[in-house]
Amino acid sequence: MIIYIAGPFRGKTPWEVHRNVHAAEYAALEVARKGHIPLAPHCLYRNFDKALPDEFWLAATITLLERCDAIYMLPRWELSQGATAEHQRATDRGMRVFYEMITVPGGNP
C-alpha cells in the first residue's frame, strides 16, 4: 500500500515545524519497515513553508492523498486544519485510516 502520513506541519516557531516534520519522518520510516510505501508531504515541502499560500499546499496535498491507498494520522492531527481536511477526504473516499502504528498491517511494497 501507499500510505499517506497526515498530521500537523505548521508551528509558532521554526522548532515546532521541525518537530512536526520529524514526527512525520519517523512515522514514514515505520510504515516502510512494515513493507509499505510512505508518502509524507511534510518531508517533501519542509523548506517551502510560507513560499506559497496555504491554500496551494492544502490542494496539493489532497491531490497526493487521492493517489494513496490509506492514510496514517499522526498524534494531534485534530489540531491541524490541513490534516483534518485530509482525514475528511480520506473517509469520504472510503480509504483505510490508521490512528496507531500497531494497526498498520505488514505488507510488501
Image: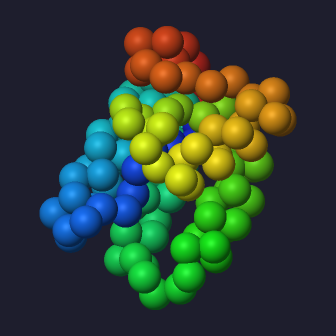
Q: Is residue 1 visible?
A: no
- 63 and 38: which is toward the camera: 63
Quadrant in which the N terminus appears? top right
Q: Going by the picture, which residue comes out furthest to the bottom?
A: 51
Residue shown at the point (65%, 48%) measured from the top left? 85
**Would residue 13 appear left or right of 66 to someone viewing this image?**
left
Q: Residue furthest left?
A: 15
Residue 28 image offset from top left, x and y in percent: 41, 41
In the rendered image, the quadrant that contains the C terminus is top right
**Compared with residue 96, is residue 74 higher up or lower down, i.e. above or below?**
below
| Left or right side of 62 for 50 | left
Residue drawn at x 46%, y 65% as measured from the top left: 44
Q: Position of residue 65 (x, y in %)?
A: 68, 49
Q: Residue at x 69, y 56 (%)?
A: 62
Look at the picture and state if 89 lies above or below 14.
above
Q: Is residue 73 above or below residue 101?
A: below
Q: Position of residue 74 (x, y in %)?
A: 42, 35
When the figure is inspected, residue 44 is found, relative to residue 90, above or below; the finding is below
